[in-house]
Image (cartoon, rainbow, N blue to C red):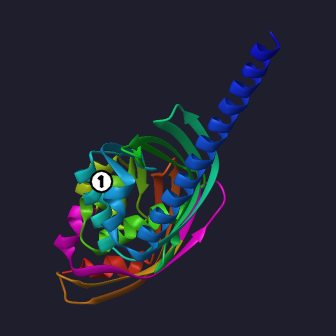
Amino acid sequence: MKHFKTSLVILLILSITSLTFRATAQDKAVKSMHQLYTTMINTGNPANLDALYAQDATIRNSDGSMVMGLENIKGQYKNTFSSGKFNIVLKTNEVTTLGKDHMFVSGSFVYNKIDEPKMGLVGEFVNTLKNEKGTWKIQKSYRYLTNKNNTAVVNGLYKAFAEGDIPRALGAMDAKIVWNEAEGNALAAGNPYIGPDAVLQGVFAKLPIDFDGFKLTNIKLHEMSNNQVLATLRYNATSKHNGKKLDAQAAHLWTVKDGKIIAFQQYADTKQLDEMLKR
């Protein structure tokens, strides 16, 4: 009986030692993986993707979009890196082992676009990792924003508009956005424009009819309370009706909810806008 109890104690010790060794090895694997990922983001070099993601990996981005399969994930990172330089800081909060071949890893991230600091994102991630022939790889990745960077949403719309990417600009809007032009502006006759398509047809599509080279300049964004962002800016263009040059002061008040723009109010030098339409 004594030998039996001794054997049980030895087995228990060995079992605990094995679990501790496995947990330590997995913690080291996670740390190594996060270092690899951080290096990839901070250098803009996607060469590490094969070592980080499984072939059947999926990513749920912080905007809710899904990317499925390693090749599509590579495409997403290629597009990201082609748009500028980034840096990221990761913090691991918890590692939960699920046997020897799977584990959950949760943590937080701070993600910045170096040349656009207002585009910084703060969030959390939950990853499912699987062991592929001794190498831990991400099988599923879920990302959630914990800060509502409303300025980044508005800045993204302005950037899309400047690049002529109207679909992307409209994509920043909620399906039921309420858009109001300044009183005295000819376009105010259609107020309120409800939904992105109404904004497209009633506002964006009409600008090329009346103006050449319409652009927004000197844009300055100010984060406000109640999920609002104030933009001060200027309108520059040439009238197609009389050749006059437009250089008008304007302000835009945006309201953002859950990462989408739900309301817009324009304030502008409507006297100048009216002069542009005279034939």
Rendered view: 41 above or below 10: below
What is the span of residues highlighted in magenta in the rendered image? Answer: 204-230
Residue 22 position, x and y percent, is 58, 41
Q: Which residue of the protein is positioned furthest toward the top in this rendering? A: 1
Q: Report whether 218 appears left or right of 222.
A: left
> At label 1, which amino acid type do we have?
Ile
Residue at 73% across, 31% down = 13
Mark 1, residues whose alpha carbon is within 10 Å: few (<14), some, or many (≥20)?
some
Q: Quadrant of the N terminus?
A: top right
Rendered view: 30 above or below 120: above
Q: Report whether 27 appears left or right of 249.
A: right
Badge 1 is on which residue? Answer: 73
Q: Quadrant of residue 131?
A: top left
Q: Which residue of the protein is positioned furthest toward the right in this rendering? A: 2
Question: Is any atom of residue 254 visible in this view?
Answer: no
**Which of 125/25 is in front?**
25
Membership of 83 in magenta stretch: no
Rendered view: 97 above or below 137: above
**Which of 226/17 is in front?**
17
Residue 9 position, x and y percent, is 76, 24
